[in-house]
Amino acid sequence: MSLSEDFRLPVACPSCGSHLMRVSQVKNPDDQVHCASCHRYICLWHEAQTVLQKGPGSESEALIEKAVNRGDH
């Protein structure tokens, strides 16, 4: 039984280019989102929700880039 859920993010993983992400089923704001393909840390769930609401675009790209480069994983 999986305790995580996959979803599609409009912004691709910087490592492998996949749009399929994985998050805990609980979906707490501070839950980590990882790439479902290469398992790289992408961002926190609340950041992913912001990207999902805004859709693809430079603002979403910048948010993911900032989260990935933050280094608190």
Image (spheres, rainbow, N blue to C red):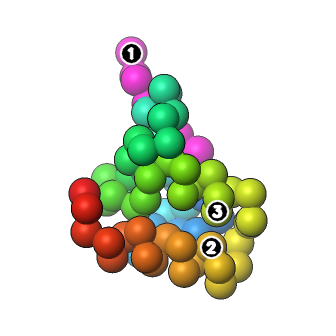
Q: Is mark 3 on a helix, strand or loop?
A: helix
Q: Which of marks 2 and 1 is in front?
A: 2
| CA neighbours of label 3 inside 10 A, class few (<14), some (14 to 19), many (20+) | many
- In the image, residue 28 above or below residue 60: above
Q: Is there any visible trace of residue 37 in the rendered image?
A: no
Residue 6: give x, y in percent of width and height: 52, 40
**Residue range corresponding to the magenta coloring:** 1-7
- In the image, residue 28 above or below residue 3: below
| CA neighbours of label 1 inside 10 A, class few (<14), some (14 to 19), many (20+) | few
- Residue name at image x 55 percent, y 50 percent: 46
Residue 35: give x, y in percent of width and height: 41, 55
| CA neighbours of label 2 inside 10 A, class few (<14), some (14 to 19), many (20+) | many
Screen quadrant of the C terminus:
bottom left
Q: Earlier in the sequence, mark 3 or mark 2?
A: 3
Tell me the kind of residue under disc 3.
Val
- Residue name at image x 40 percent, y 23 percent: 3
Check the image and name the residue furthest to the top: 1
Residue 67 image-quadrant placement = bottom left
The verdict on residue 13 being magenta is: no
- In the image, residue 22 above or below residue 47: above
Which numbered circle lies on residue 60?
A: 2
Check the image and name the residue furthest to the right: 54
- In the image, residue 26 above or below residue 52: above
- Residue name at image x 54 percent, y 80 percent: 62
- Distance of label 1 from label 3 (alpha carbons): 28 Å
Tell me the kind of residue under disc 1.
Met
Tell me the kind of residue under disc 2.
Ser
- Answer with left or right where residue 28 lies relative to residue 51: left
Which numbered circle lies on residue 51?
A: 3
Residue 50: give x, y in percent of width and height: 65, 58
Q: Which residue was labeled with disc 1?
A: 1
- Residue name at image x 49 percent, y 63 percent: 18
